Image (tube, helix red, strand yellow):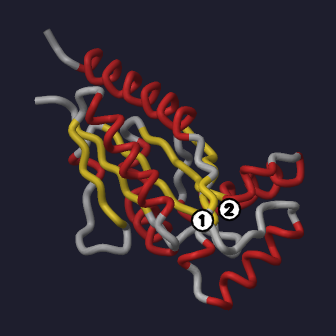
């Protein structure tokens, strides 16, 4: 039976869920079994039941989804015992600058400190602006925030910034790591 990977994610506007599903497809195409779980859903998967774990969460108002934070805190010790990765989904990644990198690093470090988890692999992934799905207040707020950063402000359309090829390369490297760990742990 192929190794299994647990993906736990939190998604506010749906882009992180879409990213988690793409990660699942890439891992499965590489021969791994995958269990995809929304942290706000029912159940509490135990990382000890999996060969590897990927956690994905998006930044909103300077932090990640609380459900992801609670799950990671509860399972931090088990996460350390196997290959693991953290995907941080954020719109600001589109506008890479030293200030953005510094802010993103601070948010991630605060999350790692709060949860007691230090992932082996980390990846910042650009998210999406889903203007057409936002209510009027959120649309107005997002337009103001994005305008300050010099971003896309046409609220009649959505913008997807995720670099799918870059994400796929990261996941394929992670899958190779998992397969390598699994083959080296097989006793002959």
In-front residue for pair 79/123: 123
Relative to residue 113, is residue 87 drawn left or right? left
Number of callouts: 2
Q: Secondary structure at mark 1?
A: helix
Relative to residue 165, is residue 129 drawn left or right? right
Badge 2 crowding class, 10 Å Cα cut-off, few under 14, some 14 to 19, many 20 or more, is some
Badge 1 crowding class, 10 Å Cα cut-off, few under 14, some 14 to 19, many 20 or more, is few
The residue under label 1 is: 114
Outermost left residue = 1
At 54% across and 57% down in the image, what residue appears? Answer: 116
Q: Position of residue 171 (x, y in %)?
A: 45, 34
Relative to residue 9, is residue 163 drawn left or right? right
Check if mark 2's residue and mark 1's residue have beta carbons within 8 Å.
yes
Relative to residue 27, is residue 170 drawn left or right? right
Quadrant occupied by the N terminus = top left
Q: Position of residue 72 (x, y in %)?
A: 44, 61
In the picture shown, does residue 187 fall above or below 5? above
At 30% across and 73% down in the image, what residue appears? Answer: 41
In the picture shown, does residue 47 fall above or below 82? below
Quadrant occupied by the C terminus = top left
The residue under label 2 is: 110
Q: Secondary structure at mark 2?
A: helix
At 86% across and 63% down in the image, what residue appears? Answer: 149
At 60% across and 48% down in the image, what residue appears? Answer: 125
């Amino acid at each position: 039976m192929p190794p299994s990977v647990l993906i736990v994610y939190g998604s506010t506007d749906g882009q992180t869920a879409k990213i988690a599903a793409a990660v699942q497809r890439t891992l499965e195409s590489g021969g791994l079994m995958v269990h995809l779980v929304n942290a706000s859903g029912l159940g509490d998967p135990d990382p000890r039941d999996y060969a590897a774990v990927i956690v994905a969460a998006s930044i909103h108002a300077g932090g990640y989804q609380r459900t992801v934070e609670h799950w990671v805190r509860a399972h931090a010790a088990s996460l350390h015992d196997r290959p693991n990765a953290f995907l941080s989904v954020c719109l600001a990644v589109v506008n890479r600058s030293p200030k953005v990198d510094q802010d993103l690093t601070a948010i991630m470090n605060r999350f790692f400190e709060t949860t007691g988890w230090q992932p082996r692999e980390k990846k910042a992934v650009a998210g999406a602006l889903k203007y057409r799905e936002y209510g009027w207040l959120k649309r107005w707020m997002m337009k103001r925030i994005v305008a300050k950063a010099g971003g896309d402000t046409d609220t009649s359309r959505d913008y997807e910034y995720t670099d799918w090829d870059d994400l796929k390369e990261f996941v394929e490297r992670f899958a190779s790591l998992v397969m390598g760990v699994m083959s080296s742990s097989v006793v002959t």
